[in-house]
Amino acid sequence: MATPRKRTVKTVADESYSKLDQYAIELHEFFKSLRKAGFTVDNSLWLLASKESYPDWMRTLTPEDIRKHIEDEEDD
């Protein structure tokens, strides 16, 4: 019988992410989870493009929020 592996959690030193950064991280983590679950790259990308398939915790940003943060970063 195999011994269960202890799951390590990565901590982030810098927690001053913008909403756009958080959204990008959420997309990346969602993609990695889909790939780990056995989805092909094409199916994973299709699910990322389909907003209806997002889990509830990813539905925090609206397109207006994202555009606002993109415009703010371009001004810098």
Image (cartoon, helix red, strand yellow):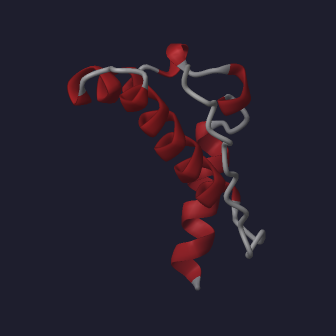
Determine whether 43 is above or below 24 in the image.
above
Determine whether 65 is above or below 48 in the image.
below
Percent x, y for residue 22?
65, 53
Number of numbered callouts drawn: 0
**Outermost top residue:** 52
Residue 34: which quarter of the image?
top left
**Which residue lies at the image location 66% right of the left edge and 43% below the top edge?**
7
Residue 10: which quarter of the image?
bottom right
**Outermost bottom residue:** 76
Q: Quadrant of the N terminus?
A: top right
Percent x, y for residue 3?
61, 30
**Outermost front residue:** 1
**Outermost right residue:** 15
Determine whether 10 is above or below 55 in the image.
below
**Which residue lies at the image location 42% right of the left edge and 22% below the top edge?**
37
Determine whether 68 is above or below 47 in the image.
below
**Which residue lies at the image location 69% right of the left edge and 64% below the top edge?**
18
Q: Quadrant of the C terminus?
A: bottom right
Percent x, y for residue 65?
67, 47
Along the line of sight, the residue nearer the viewer: 70 or 44: 44
Q: Does 20 sit left or right of 74 as displayed?
A: right
Along the line of sight, the residue nearer the viewer: 63 or 6: 6
Residue 59: which quarter of the image?
top right
**Which residue lies at the image location 63% right of the left edge and 21% below the top edge?**
55
Percent x, y for residue 58?
66, 32
